[in-house]
Image (cartoon, helix red, strand yellow):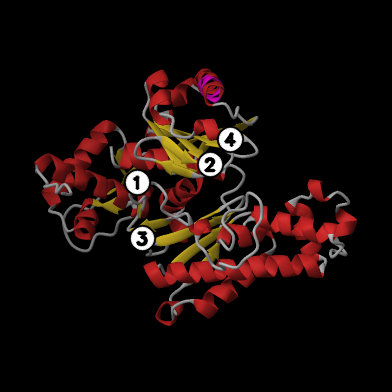
C-alpha cells in the first residue's frame, strides 16, 4: 500500500518557507504584503518567516533608491525585501564527455569563479580520488567562498537518481561509475551536502532559478537539449519533475520510426537518438562521406573518422545536399517528438538548446515540424525558444540544482 503523508505544523512551516524563497527567487523585490497576497498566507506568517530569513542573512530589507515600492495611502511606506545573493554560494561540477568544468555561483547565478580540467578517469575509484583532489584544490583556491557553500552539485550525462546520488546508466561509457554510492561517497569525504543530477535536468533548473526573464509568467516549461544524446526534462510549477526511477525526460528513447536504420551506439533503431542526436548526425554524415555523396563536406574533411560537427554545420551552410538532407530529417523528427510532448503535457514554453542550433535553420526546421504536428489547441500559445547556457552550462546547472535542493528546500 502506498504511503500517505499528512502535514504537521513543522511541515507546513517548511512548505511556507520554501514557497517564500521561491517567490523571492522569481519576483523579488517584493513587499511582505505582496508575498502574502501571492501565496494567500496571512501577514503574520510572512512577517515571522521573513524575520528568520533576515536573521540568517539571506534576505534583506531594501532602503533608499533600491526600495521602489509605491505607497497607495497614508501611513508607513511598505518596504521591499530581496535575497542577499552573495550570502550563500554553490559549487557546480560538470563531468562532461569532453572536459570537467566547475563554477561557483551566488544565489542568483552570478559567476564568482569558473574553470576547466581534463576528463576524469573512466575507472570509478580513480575518478573519485581525482575529484576529491580537485575539490581540495578549489577549497584552497577559494577559501572565502568555501565558507558560504550550501553544497556541491555534480552533473553527468545519462540516467541519474538524484534522490540517492547514484548514476544508473551511461550507456557504454564509464560503466564502472554505475550503481555506485557516488553522492554519499563525496558527502562523507567532504562533510558537505552533495547533489548528483543529470546534466540536462540541471540545466533546466538553471533556467528556472537563474533566468526568470526568459519565463515571463510561465512556471511550467520543457527544456530540450540535443547533444551526444537527447533529453527533454520538464519543470512543473517551478519544480523539476524527476519521476519514480530517475528516467524522466529521456526523450531520446522515444521510438519514432520502428523501421528506422540501426546505428552502432546510437540508441534503439528508430529512436529519436538514432535519428536526431549529434552522434547520429555525425555517423550519417560519415557514411555519406564514405559513399561519396558529400560534395562540400568532402572538401572540408578527407578522413570520415575525424569528422567534426563544426565541419558538418559549415557544409550545411555552404549547401551540401547530402548534409542538408541528413540534418533536415533529424530536425523534422525532433519536431515530431516535441509535438508529442506538447500533446501529452501541454507546456506553452519549450526551450531548445545544443550545438546543432548554431545554424539557425536547424531551429527553424524543428519549429516548422513542431507546429505542423502539435495538438491544435496548444499551438496558439506555444513558444519554442532557443537558449544557450554557454560552455559552462552543465556546471552552472549543477550549482542551480544544488541551490534548489539545499537552499530552497532546506
Disc 4 to disc 2, C-alpha distance: 18 Å
10 Å neighbourhood of mark 1: few (<14), some, or many (≥20)? few
Disc 3 to disc 4, C-alpha distance: 29 Å
Left or right: residue 184 versus residue 361 is: left
Asked which secondary structure carries label 4, the reply is strand
Residue 338 can be seen in this image: yes
Q: Any magenta on residue 129? A: yes
Q: Say if mark 3 contacts mark 4, CB within 8 Å.
A: no
Give, as a single range, the part of the protein colored magenta. Answer: 127-132
Residue that carries the numbered disc 4 in the rendered image: 101
Residue that carries the numbered disc 3 in the rendered image: 219
Q: Which callout, 1 or 2, points to the residue nearer the camera?
A: 2
Disc 1 to disc 2, C-alpha distance: 53 Å
- Residue at image location 54% in from the left, 37% down from the top: 94
Disc 3 to disc 2, C-alpha distance: 30 Å
Residue 319: percent from the left, percent from the top? Answer: 81, 69
Residue 365: percent from the left, percent from the top? Answer: 63, 72
Residue that carries the numbered disc 2 in the rendered image: 170
Q: Any magenta on residue 204? A: no
| Label placed on residue 64 | 1
Amino acid at each position: 500500500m502506498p504511503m500517505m503523508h499528512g502535514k504537521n505544523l513543522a511541515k507546513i512551516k517548511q512548505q511556507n518557507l520554501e514557497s517564500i524563497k521561491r517567490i523571492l527567487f522569481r519576483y523579488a523585490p517584493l513587499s511582505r504584503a505582496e508575498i502574502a497576497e501571492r501565496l494567500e498566507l496571512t501577514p503574520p506568517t510572512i512577517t515571522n518567516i521573513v524575520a528568520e530569513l533576515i536573521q540568517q542573512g539571506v534576505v534583506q530589507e531594501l532602503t533608499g533608491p533600491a526600495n521602489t515600492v509605491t505607497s497607495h495611502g497614508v501611513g508607513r511606506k511598505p518596504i521591499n525585501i530581496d535575497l542577499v545573493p552573495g550570502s550563500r554560494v554553490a559549487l557546480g561540477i560538470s563531468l562532461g564527455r569532453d572536459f570537467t568544468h566547475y563554477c561557483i555561483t551566488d544565489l542568483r547565478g552570478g559567476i564568482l569563479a569558473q574553470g576547466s580540467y581534463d576528463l576524469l578517469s573512466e575507472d570509478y575509484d580513480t575518478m573519485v580520488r581525482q575529484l576529491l583532489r580537485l575539490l581540495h584544490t578549489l577549497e584552497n583556491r577559494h577559501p572565502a567562498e568555501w565558507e558560504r557553500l550550501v553544497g556541491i552539485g555534480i552533473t553527468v550525462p545519462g540516467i541519474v537518481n538524484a534522490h540517492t546520488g547514484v548514476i544508473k546508466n551511461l550507456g557504454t561509457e564509464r560503466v564502472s561509475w554505475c550503481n555506485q554510492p557516488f553522492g554519499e561517497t563525496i558527502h562523507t569525504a567532504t562533510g558537505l551536502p552533495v547533489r548528483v543530477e543529470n546534466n540536462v535536468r540541471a540545466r533546466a533548473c538553471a533556467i528556472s532559478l537563474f533566468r526568470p526573464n526568459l519565463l515571463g509568467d510561465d512556471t511550467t516549461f520543457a527544456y530540450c537539449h540535443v547533444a551526444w544524446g537527447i533529453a527533454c526534462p520538464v519543470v512543473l510549477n517551478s519544480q523539476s519533475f524527476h519521476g519514480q526511477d530517475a528516467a524522466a525526460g529521456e526523450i531520446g528513447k522515444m521510438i519514432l520510426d520502428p523501421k528506422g536504420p540501426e546505428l552502432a551506439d546510437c540508441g534503439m533503431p528508430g529512436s529519436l537518438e538514432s535519428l536526431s542526436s549529434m552522434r547520429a548526425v555525425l555517423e550519417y554524415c560519415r557514411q555519406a562521406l564514405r559513399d561519396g555523396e558529400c560534395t562540400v563536406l568532402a572538401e572540408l574533411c578527407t578522413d570520415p573518422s575525424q569528422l567534426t560537427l563544426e565541419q558538418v554545420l559549415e557544409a550545411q551552410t555552404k549547401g551540401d545536399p547530402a548534409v542538408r538532407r541528413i540534418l533536415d530529417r533529424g530536425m523534422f523528427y525532433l519536431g515530431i517528438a516535441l509535438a508529442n510532448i506538447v500533446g501529452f503535457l501541454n507546456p506553452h514554453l519549450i526551450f531548445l538548446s545544443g550545438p546543432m542550433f548554431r545554424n539557425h535553420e536547424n531551429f527553424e526546421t524543428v519549429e516548422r515540424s513542431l507546429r505542423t504536428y502539435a495538438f491544435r489547441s496548444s499551438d496558439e500559445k506555444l513558444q519554442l525558444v532557443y537558449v544557450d547556457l554557454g560552455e559552462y552550462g552543465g556546471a552552472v546547472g549543477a550549482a542551480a540544482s544544488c541551490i534548489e535542493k539545499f537552499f530552497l528546500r532546506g
